[in-house]
Amino acid sequence: MNIVLFGPPGVGKGTQSDNLVNELGITHFAMGDILREAVKEGTALGLKAKTYMDSGKLVPDALVIGMIEARIMDPEVTGGFLLDGFPRNVSQAEALASMLEKHGESIDRVVFMDAPEAMLLKRLSGRLICRACGFGFHRHYSPPRKEGRCDRCSGELYQRDDDKEEVIGQRLEVYGEQTRPLLEYYKALPAFRRLDASGEMTAVYAELMKAVKN
Ligand code: AMP
């Protein structure tokens, strides 16, 4: 099963994806994580991407399309995949459609997750991530047991630079201008499902599962 998950930053794509891929036994490709990894490793692509990411802008299509294609088409990826954070504009969606067609694959579900902007702001500004294992927490909704430390591996928790207030506004603007138009692109497809992601995490997950299975 191949799934695309899209929606505004802070809507919970990453959190929900982690559970979904475990339950379905498919591979998770989170474009933001792939880019942050490249930044951490200091690769040429990572260095180029960093300036865009730090300012809340989209990394140029030419960089991200190549990175995602290499992963999707890896022969070790069997049983399907979930794309989270890709595509993020219509030209990436077109590139995805043609790369899948070229390799005889298709998208089984495109799920659009949405929530009111005030909620997105609250979710983004309280988000904390473990430097060691990448697990996510939230200052108010799912705080770690010990302040500043990951429950799973005791790693140090940090706030992403682009989750700071100055950058959040820019990310939401970019979302409205470039990513939200994907709704028009995808909504007529039989694979399309829309999900209200404003509820509590487990309730949203149950709805997501239904959207994927029905
Ligand atoms: P995320 O972790 O999904 O919020 O992504 C963090 C940042 O990575 C975004 O603000 C963009 O700068 C960059 N990014 C992630 N996915 C894409 C994409 N599909 N196209 C361009 N830039 C992206």
Image (cartoon, grey):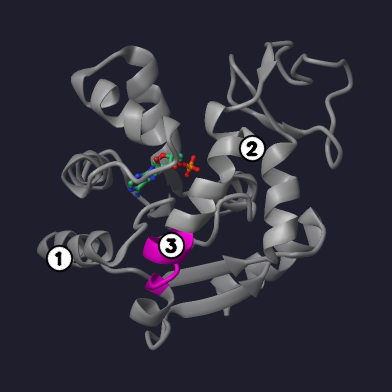
Looking at the rendered structure, the kind of residue marked 1 is Ser
The quadrant holding residue 31 is: top left
Residue that numbered label 2 is attached to: 165
Quick one: label 2 or label 1, which is nearer the N terminus? 1
Residue 208: percent from left, percent from top? 64, 66
Quick one: label 3 or label 2, which is nearer the N terminus? 3
Residue neighbourhood size for the residue with mark 1, other residues' Cα within 10 Å, grouped as few (<14), some (14–19), many (≥20) = some
Residue that numbered label 1 is attached to: 98
Q: Secondary structure at mark 1?
A: helix
Residue 106: percent from left, percent from top? 28, 69
For the point 29% across and 31% down, the residue is 49
Report the image quarter containing ligand 1: top left
Q: Secondary structure at mark 2?
A: helix
For the question of whether residue 205 can be seen, the reply is: no
Residue neighbourhood size for the residue with mark 3, other residues' Cα within 10 Å, grouped as few (<14), some (14–19), many (≥20) = many
Magenta region: 175-182
Residue 48: percent from left, percent from top? 24, 27
| Disc number placed over residue 45 in the picture, else none | none
With respect to residue 102, does 48 lie above or below?
Answer: above
Residue that numbered label 3 is attached to: 3
